[in-house]
Image (cartoon, rainbow, N blue to C red):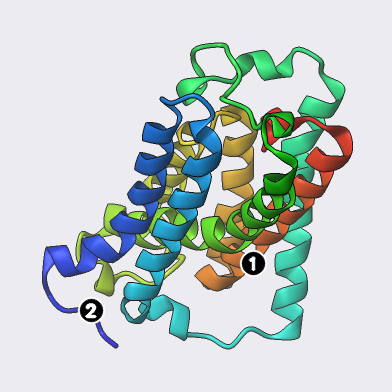
Amino acid sequence: MPFKNTKLDTFIPYFSPYFAFLGIKAIADLFPNGLYLGYILAYVAAAALLWIFHQKYQEMHENKITSLNLFWALIVGVIGITIWILPYHYIANFAKTDGIFGLLGSRQNTIKLHHLQKSWLSPFILFRFVGYVLIVPIFEELFIRSFLWRYIINPDIEKVAVGEYTAFAFWGTAILFALSHNEWIVAFLYAVIINLFLIIKKDIKLCMIAHGFSNTILIIYVIISENWFLW
C-alpha cells in the first residue's frame, strides 16, 4: 500500500513504536523495580503499534529474502555483536564510558534477576528475549535506517530508495543509533557495519535479521557471563 501524501501519515508509523518504547521505559525506570514492568509494557506497546501500522511499511513488502542474503545477514549479525561484546569482555574498565548518551560515566539501570520472584523469573526472561530479538530490531531499523535515513536525504521519503547513500544520512544515523544506547562506543561501530550492509543489500529486512541475530547472541552471552549490564 503506498503512503498517503501527508506528513503525519508518514511520520506516525515510524515514530510511534520507537518513542512509545523509549518513553514507557524512561517513565518506568523512575520507580523502584519499574524496569521489569516497564520492559513488558514497552514491548507490548511497540508490538501493538507495529501491527496497527504494518501496512504502512511498504519497504517490508519488497524484495524476497534469498537463502544467500539470509546467510549474509546472519554473518553481519555475528560480526557486529562480536565487536560489541569484546571490549566489555576483555577491558575491565570499559563500561565506565557508559551512561546517558555515553557521557555521564555510569552504567545503565541494569536488570537484576535476583530481584524477581521465582514465579516471574522464567516468564520475564522469555518475554525479554522475544521482545529483544523480534520487536526491537523491527522498530529500530524502521525508524533509524528506513525512515530517518531517507528523511535526511529528502523529507518526501517515497522519493528515496531504501539504502540510497549520502554521507550525511550514513553518519547521521550511525551517530543517532550510538547516542540512543548506553554502550555508545560499540553502538557506533555496530551502526557503521549495519549501515554498510544496508547500502550493499538495499533491504531493511536483512538489517532487521542481522540485528535480531546479534541480539540473540548478546542474550546468550549475557546469561552465560552474567554481565547483565549489557542487557
Residue located 42% across and 34% down the image: 28
How many numbered marks does the figure carry? 2
Q: Is residue 36 above or below residue 202?
A: above
Residue located 82% across and 32% down the image: 226
38 vs 85, nearest the viewer: 38
Q: Which amino acid does label 1 sit on?
A: Ile
- Image quadrant where residue 197 sits: bottom right
Residue 94 percent location from the top left of the image? 72, 18
Q: Which amino acid does label 2 sit on?
A: Phe
- Image position of 104 (left or right of 156): right
Residue 95 percent location from the top left of the image? 69, 19
- Image position of 204 (left or right of 107): left
Label 2: how many Cα within 10 Å (few below 14, some 14–19, many 20+): some
Write down the residue under mark 2.
Answer: 3
186 vs 183, nearest the viewer: 183
197 vs 135, nearest the viewer: 135
Label 1: how many Cα within 10 Å (few below 14, some 14–19, many 20+): many
Q: Is residue 58 above or below residue 111?
A: below
Residue located 75% across and 47% down the image: 219
Write down the residue under mark 1.
Answer: 209
- Image position of 211 (left or right of 39): right
Residue 53 percent location from the top left of the image? 32, 73
Residue located 31% across and 77% down the image: 56
**Quadrant (top left, top right, bottom left, bottom right) of the N terminus:** bottom left
**Quadrant (top left, top right, bottom left, bottom right) of the C terminus:** top right
